[in-house]
Image (tube, helix red, strand yellow):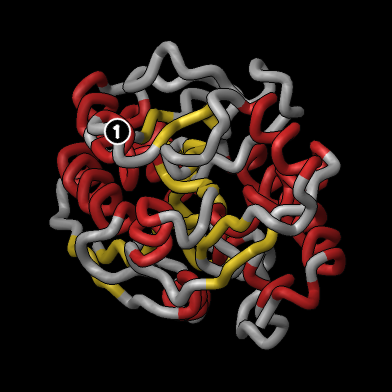
Amino acid sequence: MKLVVGFPPGGPTDVIGRMIASNLMAELGPPVVIENLGGAGGTIAAAYVARSAADGYTLLVSVESSQTRARALYPAIRYDQVGSFTFLRKLAKQRNLLVTNPNLPVASVADLIAYAKARPGQLSFGGTVGATSHVGGTIFNRLNDIDMTFISYAGGNQPVTDLMTGTIQVGFFTESTVAELVRNGRIRALAVTALERSPAFPDLPTVQEAGGGRLDISPWFGLVGPAGLPAPVVRRLFEAAERISRKEAFRAQIETIGASPIRDSNPETFRSEVEEEIRFWSGWAEQHRAQLP
């Protein structure tokens, strides 16, 4: 079996893909080989799997950037985000943290909102266009009627570095990316941008708990195959993924990158959630067209 990952080796999607692959191999028997096809926010890998034989031997680690936001960001993608795939199950999600430069004189989400309201356009947040580091800030702006300026980066660690130096003041980064920097005081965490608190930072409130509006920009990871997988294959793959999601060992594995298992998912709910997210991101893209490629 081949499990395709749409990002280079070493990143969160690759790491969690390898964890999924090892567990699939334990559940199903045949070797599961990772193939990294990085580029364009995971859309190259998604297009490859969409064109693959519908036999269950080529699967994709599905992520929200290529499965739900891609058409809004890159209208020329060569696959249908729903129709080109057979949905199996969501398996895990990460959490993002709302973080600031430690010299910014704010100690809470309420402080940040008040500070930003008094200085429209003067605070900046940075990230990669279309990633949660970007969309998190735009949604936070809208929810709280503030105007922080987005600074676009090609990717990598540069926006985190610039947050530490004060070049930008605010960030919406994955927990695994910034956890150690928070612990050693190089950046300050104000809240979790998910609907639940993080086991790694149990005293850190969610944005909603802190009065900043309901904000959930948790990146998720799932399994999809090409459209047309036979029903017996879908059933066998789903049942394997279901067992994996409930294994304590899998939970412990993915917690090392700040992720948690998704307990309730199936092919029907996965597909409907993707359709709902596509509608949301289409509207979001229209509102932020000037910032997009």
Q: How crowded is mark 1: few (under 14 residues within 10 Å), some or many (20 or more)?
A: few
State which quarter of the image contains the N terminus.
bottom left
Q: Residue furthest top?
A: 203
Residue 230, how many percent across, how many down?
A: 51, 57
Out of 215 and 100, give the one closest to the viewer: 100
Question: Residue drawn 73% across and 71% down?
Answer: 72
Residue drawn at the location 68% of the way across and 87% of the way down:
76
Rendered position, 51 above or below 94: below
Q: Quadrant of residue 4?
A: bottom left
Relative to the observer, which residue lies in front, 52 or 249?
Answer: 249
* Relative image position of residue 153 (x, y in whole percent): 48, 72
Task: Determine whether the residue tagged by mark 1 lies in a helix, strand or loop.
Answer: loop
Please indicate whether residue 200 sits to the left or right of residue 208 in the image: left
Task: Give the residue type that dot 1 points to.
Answer: Gly
Residue at image mark 1: 185
Q: Quadrant of residue 261?
A: top left
**Is 48 or 43 nearer to us in this picture?**
43
In which quadrant of the rendered view does residue 210 lie? top right
Side of 116 relative to 264 (left or right): right
Q: Please determine whether, in this image, residue 1 is positioned above or below residue 201.
A: below
Residue found 54% across the figure and 20% down from its top: 196
Q: Is residue 283 left or right of residue 260?
A: right
x 33%, y 77%: residue: 37
Q: Can residue 274 be seen in this view?
A: yes
Relative to 78, does residue 93 appear above or below in the rendering? above
Work out whether residue 11 or residue 48 is closer to the camera in this orientation and state it.
11
How many circles with numbers are drawn on the protein?
1
Quadrant for the C terminus in the image: bottom right
* Rendering coords of residue 228 (x, y %): 57, 65
Residue 58 seen from this side:
no
- Which x, y percent locates residue 55? 40, 66
